Image: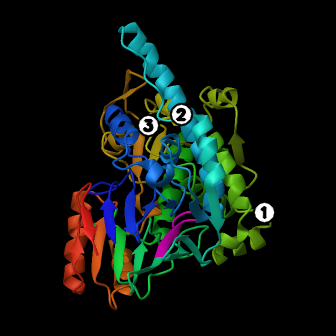
Amino acid sequence: MRIHFNGAARTVTGSQHLLEINGYRLLLECGLFQGRRQETYEKNLHFSFNPAKIDAVILSHAHIDHSGNLPNLVKNGYSGPIYATTATAKLVDIMLRDSAHIQEKDIEFVNKRRLRRGEPPMEPLYTAQDAERVNDLMRAYHYDEEFEPVPGVKVRLRDAGHILGAAGVELDIEEKGRKLRLWFSGDIGRLKLPLVRDPVLPEDVDYMMMECTYGDKPHRDPEEAFLEFRDVVRKTLKRGGKVIIPAFAVGRTQELVFDLNRMMSNGDVPRAPVYVDSPLAVAASRIFHEFPDYFDEETNRFIREERHPALQFDQLHYIQSVEESKKLNDRQEPMVIISASGMAETGRILHHLRNNIENPRNTVCIVSWQAPHTLGRRLADGEKLVRIFGELYELRAEVATIGGLSAHAGQDFLLQYALAASGHLRQIWLVHGEPDAAMAFKQKLVEVQNTPVAYPEMFDRVEL
């Protein structure tokens, strides 16, 4: 058995881990790398393996850094099954169609500039047609339901508590008479997150591939983060400003809507319109409504007590058309605008930032990890001049960064997660983490347990 670390190695995004077992090739994840635009195009365009020779794919969840390069995989010859939870399968379909639209529009814009410079046109990474072909290959399973993607490998998807449908991947492998259990964490959620249930911890594991995005810092209790978010919203609305929130369309947007519903229902903040301005987030929210069984008890209790769904309330408005979106920038009254993308790199959030960051009454609220070289990272770092659509804007709005709202586990729960697996654990590989976070977490692991811990480089290969 071999493991190839072809993505999210010594970085957070672009997840791809290739397993060779019994002569078969099984791919865990097929995500987009995110960073500098030209660099991301080149990295995402080419695979370090032949897609046509992959036998099966397993997805932990729908986020684009885990699923977003599937259409390119299919475009380059992959035609096998893609396994995921039922909710992930539905979310992936809408997310990849949206991603394809962005790929096509971005290349259209780039090609206009290339044409003026006399340069040949480029092709999009993939098209809407490629994204549609992915959906035909999806095979959906419920949590804890066993399936066999390739001979000798039995898999169960365990609730990861990260976003709707997210899973840790438990692989029971038999090869040449030897049996072992490999656990791939995917993205690990947190205890007491809104909407979703708490993560299932690994058990009886021999080898584990584990994310460490926040390996260098513990998170505060989610309720503390909620209170800080509430204070930011209250202060901004009371001074007549807008709260502008770049948020991932799937997961984070729905959690923020739930939090805003709570604080307005309780009378903790002034009632003001809340706009979700992202067609993808609107579609994702509809899918959330289809899976009440995936909600935690707190959410279901809230629904029962407040007599309205957790993702729908009087002040909430879902924006679909471009015209509706543009009208928000002409309005001056207090409001909350949640829009994609989460790292403020593409989409309608760019227009809202351009129109609002020079007004000191407003607040830009950063609620998730921001990759290096993205607009979201520059805002979080407090750069006074930022470039949007090629123009410079002065950052006069307040910037509030609330790390405790993250759907990723912090260092404290990551340690708990690793220790749960440590009975006869032989090796941990840390993935999905920048070097500082990974090395800090590795040091913590070494202090509390004897299991060897590695931090593989991109394209490293190990043999078991």
Residue 200 in magenta stretch: no
Q: Is residue 306 above or below residue 445?
A: above
Q: Quadrant of residue 221?
A: bottom left
Q: If the image is split into quadrants, where does the C terminus sit?
A: bottom left
Q: Which label's residue is closer to the chain start, 1 or 2?
A: 2
Disc 3 residue type (three-letter): Glu
Q: Nearer the viewer, residue 280 or 377?
A: 280
Q: Nearer the viewer, residue 236 or 415?
A: 415
Q: Which residue has dot 1 on it?
A: 308
Residue 42 visible to the viewer: yes
The mark nearer the N terminus, 3 or 1, is 1
Residue range corresponding to the magenta coloring: 161-170
Q: Residue at x 34, y 54 (%)?
A: 7
Q: If the image is split into quadrants, where does the N terminus sit?
A: bottom left
Residue at mark 2 to residue at mark 3: CA–CA distance: 11 Å
Residue 204 x, y percent position in the rendering: 41, 88
Q: Position of residue 156 (x, y in %)?
A: 55, 76
